[in-house]
Amino acid sequence: MKCSSGKRAFDSVALAEEALIQHHIRNDYKKGEGPINIYECKECGNWHFTSKGIEHELFNDQEIVRRIESERRAFLWEQKLR
């Protein structure tokens, strides 16, 4: 779904958070780079990524950080083997 802002829109917080995690898995961002949080859009009422402001609490959860690192390694190997 798209918003009039042109940004990708997510219907719920949970979907936006999972998409944020997946985005970090597939892109090798350094700490604080890329999208770092989500916000509710006043225009469409859905959720978008933002690269500004405070980093989402997900990135302080060691289980999530390990998941991102592990799935990123798997994703990179998958790309090499294609």
Image (spheres, rainbow, N blue to C red):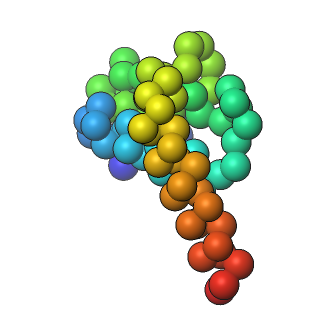
x, y percentage for residue 14?
28, 37
Q: Quadrant of the C terminus?
A: bottom right
Could you tell whether 8 is left or right of 34 in the image?
A: left
Does residue 25 appear anywhere in the picture? no
The residue lying toward the viewer, choosing from 82 and 7, is 82
Q: Position of residue 3 (x, y in %)?
A: 42, 38
Q: Quadrant of residue 29?
A: top right
* Nearer to the camera, 4 or 40: 40
Q: Is residue 68 visible?
A: yes
Counting from the top left corner in percent of width and height, residue 34 is at 66, 36
| 3 over 28 or under it: above or below | above
Residue appearing at x 69%, y 30% in the figure: 31
Q: Residue at x 59, y 13 (%)?
A: 53
User: Is 62 on the left or on the right of 79, as rendered?
Assistant: left
Relative to 5, say whether 78 is above or below: below
Q: Is residue 81 left or right of residue 19?
A: right
Q: Which quadrant of the structure image shows residue 70?
A: bottom right
Q: How many marks?
A: 0
30 sits to left or right of 55? right
Farthest top residue in view:
53
**Where is 61 relative to 18, above or below?**
above
Return the x and y of residue 37 as percentages of the image width and height.
50, 26
- What is the residue that sits farthest to the bottom in this orientation? 82
Q: Residue at x 42, y 38 (%)?
A: 63
